[in-house]
Image (spheres, rainbow, N blue to C red):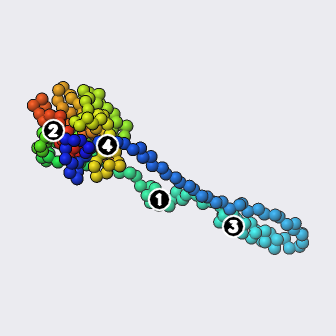
Amino acid sequence: MSSQETEPDDEDTGPLSVRDARPTSAAATDRRFDSPLSVNPRPVRRDNRPVVLIAAATAAIVALGVLAWSFWPSSPNTDAPSGDAGATTKTESPEQAEARLRAMLPRGYAADSCEAVVPAKGALVQLSCAPNADTGGPLSATYTLAKDNDALEGLFDDVVNTSSVVDCPGNIQSPGPWRRNATPQETAGTLVCGFQQSKPTVAWTTDANLMVSAVQSGPQGPNMVQLYTWWASHS
């Protein structure tokens, strides 16, 4: 992290300036279709061999049909196995989403410290956690997996709108982007510091995981600096 109050280790995080990276993609499809066959009929001299002529004409028609079929653009075979195209995307169950969220919790929580609660609107799963055992750790916390990017933004805005927002320790912009020191060129998410009912609160998004985290201490501590220091080494 970038704050003056902490000494970041390899996992430390902190807000830095943002660069806008806009990935681009290009795709080109080159299709070539052969020109349709053209047939120039030749005059046929009538003679006394109608059977031979009919047989020859029939053979010519069949040959033309074979050629036309071979040059005709192929269409998908709906009866053939479609492989990946016919596979259905497996939907993540609530249990799987909860397990995934638990695997992303900051260190310092015992196995039974967090319990699932009724998720907020736009959330897949939400955990409410007891005090974190690490130094300066929060007394309570809520960790949420959002359904999509719009839901992620909405869930984070709910935290911001219910907080008395202040600058984070070290005069860090709040709300503002944060980055991990290991990857300073990449924005990891958005950070906010504030107070909720006089309780120091730090909340942040982890955009790659569609995760919103909000941690609180109490009037007796840890104070905002201690809570922010804990965040810097646990986010």
The residue that label 2 is drawn on is: 226
Give the amino acid at mark 4: Leu
Q: Secondary structure at mark 1?
A: loop
In this rendered view, identify the residue nearer to me: 160 or 59.
160
Q: Are marks 2 and 4 in contact (CB under 8 Å)?
A: no
* 10 Å crowding of disc 3: few (<14), some (14-19), many (20+): few
Q: CA distance from mark 3 to mark 4?
A: 66 Å
Q: Is residue 30 left or right of residue 88?
A: right
Q: Are marks 4 and 1 in contact (CB under 8 Å)?
A: no
Q: Which of the two marks, 4 or 1, is nearer to us in this view?
A: 4
Give the vertical position of 232 relative to 163 (above or below).
Answer: below
Q: CA distance from mark 4 to mark 1?
A: 47 Å
Give the amino acid at mark 3: Leu
Q: Secondary structure at mark 3?
A: helix
The residue that label 3 is drawn on is: 67
Give the amino acid at mark 1: Ser
The answer to which quarter of the image holds residue 133 is top left
The disc placed on residue 82 is 1
The disc placed on residue 45 is none
The residue that label 4 is drawn on is: 16
At a point 68% along the width and 67% down the height, the residue shown is 66
Q: Quadrant of the C terminus?
A: top left
Give the amino acid at mark 2: Gln
**Which residue appears farthest toward the left when viewing the image?**
220
Q: Is residue 235 left or right of residue 19?
A: left
In this rendered view, identify the residue nearer to me: 140 or 58.
140
